[in-house]
Image (spheres, helix red, strand yellow):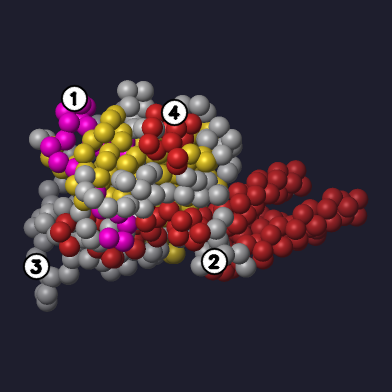
Amino acid sequence: MPIELRIISGARSGARETFTKSIIAIGRHPMNDLRLDAENDLDVSGRHAEIRVVGGTVTIRDVGSSNGTKVNGQPLVGERALFEGDVIALGGAAGASVEFHQVAEGAPAPTPEPVAAAAPAPGPARPRRDTTARIAEAVEVQTGKLRRILYVFGAAVVLVGLGLVWMSRRNADADRATIEQLLKELQDQNAAIAALRGSAGARGLTDEVGRISRERDSLLTILKAGGDRGAVSQRIAELNALQTAAGAVSKVDYERIVVQSRRAVAFIVVERADGIEGGSGFGVTRDGIIVTNRHVVQNADAVPPTRIAVQFHGTKRWLPARLLSVSNADDLAFLKVDAPGTFPTVLGISASGGVRAGAPIAIIGYPLGNEIAGMGGSIDTLTASATVTAGIVSKSVPDILQVDAYVAHGSSGSPVFDQRGLVVGVVYGGPTEAAGRIVYSVPSDRLIAQLPGEAAGAVRP
């Protein structure tokens, strides 16, 4: 079902866009479907909200924005349906508003209305955000996945609890044994939430569970609409799966992984005849051999770069580098720092054949690297600062290690670490429609088979 979104306030006021996709991502990041102004709509997050179209039903949910979402003036909590003419407010005074409309099948796309020139706002212009603020926003987006796991898990616990109370009032004595069993499972899940609150991996995220209380009115409405014991049992089974995933992520010692290997993750800048490209890579030998992607250092025509410079995390020094080799089979390339010295390396590279779906991972790299580096002229003052992203393996096959995490332009060449802090993959991309949330990487088994001989010492059992 086609839908039309009309921007009625904000920097792009007057614009209209029509979508036929089932998932429409909204925010300031360029990978969103409905992209708002990155410089002026400052109350809108990089990834702010999602509209989903399933059959004849259209729903919206906030995806962990900093300043919240409202529909017709009411704060959006959880997921709610959209109806013709609904107004969606994204963020606060410096945000944007969008009006929702359904489009009849086969109707021609509307001609965009002319936008009147906006009168200049009184007072000084809003200052451009510095690099620190942009990095903070990127980190907030990247940790959204783990927060949503905890939030959905906690909200569903409240839903099941209210459902059991409601069910207990209408069921006969013969149903009591079933209800008591469901209550026991619910208590076990509550204990798991308490354990997550005290774990180092979940620190700073479990405060999202406190927002559950604001869902009570909408949950009561859902319960009164119907439901039975079978549906409740199925939902508890789903929550158990969420608990397992959230618990695994919360137990990973990400601080240890950062201490062990982040210094070895390098920001790479490549100069070619057709422009400048940025990416990520990681050191595997003390004399400066770096692993990255083939597409970071070569364009589609395999034209070699004219210059390569790398900067390791936490440093300001740009080091010249040269291209050692590129892989013909995988999106891999190997660089060599062309300067004297001893350089940091990752803890090690492990075989990826033992990695299974559901396993927690960490990605360290430079998403939005070009923007953070200030390629317009401030690159000489940059201190490289790699970003850490938590995620879960969603598929592991010989040719691809697929993970559910967050990456963006600049993440290419980032190392994927397992729970032990060993590299099990090298990020190279993902499907465009996933908006950076599904990540493809070269499995470490294939990397190990192509390492230069002097890098063999980086392999660990």
Question: 292 or 53: which is nearer to us?
Answer: 292
Of mark 1 and mark 3, the one earlier in the sequence is 3
Alpha carbon distance from label 3 to label 4? 60 Å
Q: Is residue 345 left or right of residue 199?
A: left
Return the residue at label 3: 120
Q: Amino acid at mark 2?
A: Arg
Per the image, label 4 sits on a secondary structure element best described as helix
Question: Would you name the residue on which mark 1 appears?
Answer: 301
How many residues crowd mark 4 within 10 Å: few (<14), some (14–19), many (20+)?
few
Residue pictured at 38% horizontal, 64% vertical: 66
Q: Is residue 348 above or below residue 188?
A: above
Helix, strand or loop under label 3: loop
What is the spatial separation of the Cα atoms under label 1 and label 4, in whole angstroms?
25 Å
Lower position in the chain sequence, tag 3 or tag 4: 3
Q: Which region of the structure is painted magenta? A: 292-315
Mark pair 1, 3: CA separation: 46 Å
> Quick one: quadrant of the C terminus?
top right
Q: Earlier in the sequence, mark 4 or mark 2?
A: 2
**Circle 1 SS class:** loop
Residue type at mark 4 is Ala
Q: State the CA–CA distance, disc 4 to disc 2.
A: 38 Å
Label of residue 449 in the image: 4
> Most extreme residue toward the right, as rendered?
174
- As shown in the figure, which amino acid type bears the numbered disc 1? Asp
